[in-house]
């Protein structure tokens, strides 16, 4: 890709997707873990093609147990911005 890592991270921050990059081989680009972190995903590494099914199974299992929570602040004058919530 001709996209610079900084531009890529800016783009994925604005999307509402989970990214699970999988590096194949002995090395992994440094942007993979960061891209996964900013989107809520996880970066994995498969040393060989035969290790891919295990990595994909791990992702599928993780996605099976995720939930999506939504929050809408009350009141018409609610200020925009980040709000922390606690789920118990």
Image (cartoon, grey):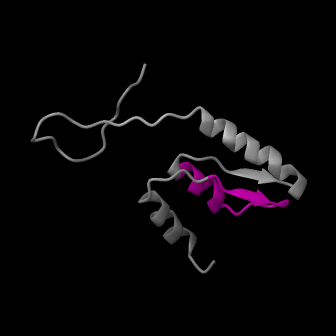
Residue 84 pos. (x, y %): 34, 34
User: Is residue 48 something one can see in this rendering?
Assistant: no
Left or right, 40 with reference to 57: left
Quadrant of residue 79 within the rendered picture: top left
Identified at 49% across, 61% down, the residue is: 12
Residue 62 pos. (x, y %): 64, 37
> Where are the magenta residues, as a range?
20-38
User: Is residue 53 something one can see in this rendering?
Assistant: yes
Left or right, 2 with reference to 73: right
Quadrant of residue 86 within the rendered picture: top left
- Residue closest to the far top: 88
- Residue closest to the far left: 77
Reply yes or no: does residue 70 show up in magenta: no
Identified at 68% across, 43% down, the residue is: 59
Identified at 35% across, 30% down, the residue is: 85
Residue 73 pos. (x, y %): 22, 36
Identified at 86% across, 55% down, the residue is: 47
Residue 32 pos. (x, y %): 65, 58
**Nearest the eye: 60 or 39:** 60
Left or right, 80 with reference to 65: left
């Amino acid at each position: 890709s001709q996209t610079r890592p900084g531009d890529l991270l800016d783009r994925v921050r604005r999307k509402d997707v989970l990214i699970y990059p999988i590096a194949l081989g002995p090395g992994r680009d440094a942007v993979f873990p960061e891209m996964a972190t900013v989107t809520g995903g996880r970066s994995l590494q498969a040393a060989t093609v035969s290790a891919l099914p295990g990595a994909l199974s791990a992702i599928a299992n993780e996605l099976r147990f995720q939930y999506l929570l939504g929050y809408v602040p009350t009141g018409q004058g609610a200020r925009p911005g980040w709000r922390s919530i606690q789920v118990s």
